[in-house]
């Protein structure tokens, strides 16, 4: 029993030594405040700050991201391997040197990760021969006047005018007209359309015309 207890104590001692040595060595490494700016070159050659870039130390499990100006700042240890990554750019690696000062400022320039994809042609026909046959079989009218008459049909244009909703400029114009009318009538009484005799005359006239058509 005493023998097993002695072996257990020896094993525990070695385990404590193994865990203590890395902590001791890490405590000897100097803490440095790493700051910097991440830059990138656009297609037009202009160099800009790159926001949202990930600055990460994998072994330590800590990191940060750049702000809207591409600036970052985080505490690191001398000798740490820092990974700088951003979507659309190649990953960069930086080893923190044993700097004499407690502060270190760097400038990182990212390189675009350009991937060229193979050209893909999308066709409505299975083969090129079938496509050519379909093109040759097209019956294109030679007289364009019939096409113009069909597009300028009065009934069709009236239906389009009736069913097409107002777009942005038309809605804006309608609102401005209503606002101008309200400004003109703000110092006077507002007329009720139901009390307008001219509107009633137009209404009865339209009823008579509808009755004659029937």
Image (cartoon, rainbow, N blue to C red):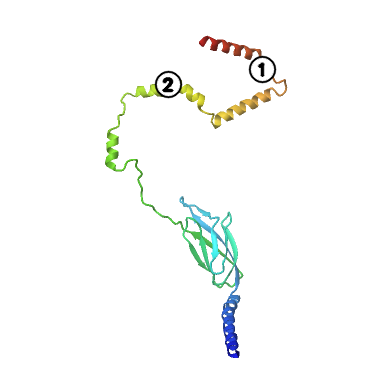
Say which residue label 1 marks: 194
Q: Farthest residue in the bottom direction?
A: 2
Quadrant position of residue 74: bottom right
**Between discs 1 and 2, the one toward the N terminus:** 2
Identify whether 92 is placed above or below 196: below
Q: Position of residue 64 (x, y in %)?
A: 58, 61
As drawn, the residue found furthest toward the front would be 1
**Element at label 1:** helix
The residue mark sitting in front, 1 or 2, is 1
Q: Nearer the viewer, residue 49 or 151?
A: 151
Q: Decide: is 106 above or below 43.
A: below
Q: Quadrant of residue 32?
A: bottom right
User: What is the crowding at mark 2: few (fewer than 14 residues within 10 Å), some, or many (at least 20)?
Assistant: few
- Local packing at callout 1 (Cα closer than 10 Å; few below 14, some 14-19, many 20+) is few
| Residue sitting nearer the eye, 44 or 173 | 173
Q: Is residue 155 left or right of residue 170?
A: left
Q: Which residue corresponds to mark 2?
A: 153
Give x and y (percent) for residue 164. 51, 28
Q: Position of residue 168 (x, y in %)?
A: 55, 32
């Amino acid at each position: 029993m005493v023998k097993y207890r002695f072996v257990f104590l020896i094993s525990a001692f070695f385990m404590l030594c193994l865990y203590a040595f890395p902590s001791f060595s890490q405590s000897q490494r100097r803490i440095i405040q790493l700051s910097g700016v991440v830059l990138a070159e656009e297609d037009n050659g202009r160099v800009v700050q790159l926001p949202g870039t990930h600055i990460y130390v994998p072994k330590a499990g800590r990191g940060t991201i750049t702000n809207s100006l591409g600036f970052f700042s985080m505490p690191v240890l001398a000798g740490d391997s820092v990974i700088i990554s951003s979507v659309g750019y190649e990953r960069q690696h930086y080893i923190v040197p044993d700097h004499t000062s407690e502060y270190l400022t760097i400038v990182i320039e990212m390189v675009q990760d350009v991937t060229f994809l193979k050209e893909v042609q999308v066709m409505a026909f299975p083969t090129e021969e079938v496509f050519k046959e379909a093109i040759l079989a097209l019956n294109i009218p030679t007289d364009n006047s019939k096409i113009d008459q069909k597009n300028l049909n009065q009934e069709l244009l009236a239906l389009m005018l009736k069913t097409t909703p107002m777009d942005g400029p038309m809605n804006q114009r309608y609102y401005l007209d209503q606002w101008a009318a309200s400004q003109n009538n703000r110092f006077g009484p507002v007329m009720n359309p139901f009390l307008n005799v001219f509107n009633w005359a137009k209404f009865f006239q339209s009823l008579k015309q509808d009755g004659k058509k029937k």
